[in-house]
Amino acid sequence: MFIVQVNQQDFPVEVVLKRTNRKIYLRIRDGVIWITTPTKLTKSFVINMIDKNFDYIIEHMKQSSKIEDKIHFLGKSYALNIQNSYHNSIYVKEEEILIEVTNSSYIGKLIEELYTNALKNVVETYSKGILFQFNLVEPVTFQYKKVNGYYGECFPKKRKIILSTRLAKYDLQYILSVIYHECAHFKYPNHQQAFYTYLEERYPNYRAVQRNLRKIKYNEKY
């Protein structure tokens, strides 16, 4: 992450290199400008990009700051209840997520564990049927990683899909849409029209789900 100054304002920027992309994407998350790009970018290019999208960035920065400090899990918003304890545990209750810790440094680890286990459960439940739809008869490995730059990534030659653990914040339909998206990359590595045609034959409302996903504003603190 680095800081750039545009119109006398400082902006934290995170650039994520993703060679499977065909375009450069700019998003605002938790007060940070995230730029996902298929090629390396110069600092001057980044500054120019921020300048061109200045009004959009300022407006979304304001919206991000208004998001309540909540924790989100599988599409639902919970109050976060943190208590000191002699052990480290996390519990999902009706209206809150209770975290009992011996030290505050364990909070993030417990939340990551909760997210990872939720994604593993989704994959165990749905992946066999999804892989069948894509005629993927050889084993595919799913891995889980704490990353904010993308929701999922596919490595066809390694037969591997990586899911961002933050996906567990979202409703099941969004998690499944990402899994379908990454499975389509086994046939089409890039995002050409044929890729989306192939994907939407198996997930017909994919574009609508993705449009809704982009509208969701969750606090990125957890």
Image: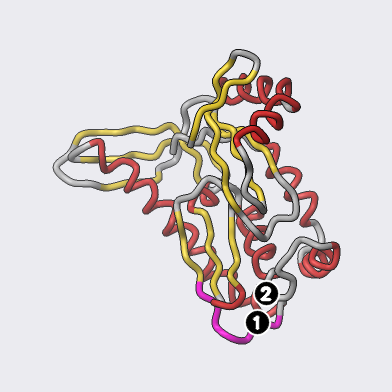
Element at label 2:
loop
Residue 92 lies, in percent from the top left, at: 40, 45
Whether 209 is drawn above or below 95: the answer is below
Q: Please name the amino acid that badge 1 sits on.
A: Leu
Residue 68 belongs to magenta span: no
Q: For the point 81% across and 62% down, which residue is it?
A: 192
Of residues 170 and 153, the one drawn nearer to the viewer in this rendering: 153
- Towards the viewer: 137 or 83: 137
Which of the marked residues, 1 or 2, is nearer the chain's N terminus? Answer: 1
Identity of the amino acid at label 2? Phe
Say which residue label 2 marks: 186
Residue 139, located in which quarter of the rendered image?
Answer: bottom right
Classify 103 as above or below 89.
above
Residue at disc 1, secondary structure: loop
Q: Position of residue 45 (x, y in %)?
A: 67, 35
Residue span colored magenta:
135-141
Kindly give the residue lying farthest to the bottom in the view shown: 137
Query: In the image, what residue occupies the spot 50% across and 40% down?
Result: 72
Q: Is residue 158 above or below residue 169?
A: below
> In the rendered picture of this protein, how many numbered marks are placed on residues?
2
Could you say which disc has been placed on residue 177 in the image?
none
Picture quadrant of residue 129: bottom right
* Residue annotated with mark 1: 136
Measured along the vertical axis of the image, is residue 152 above or below residue 49? Answer: below
Q: Quadrant of the C terminus?
A: top left
Taking the image as shown, residue 8 lies to the left or right of residue 77, namely right
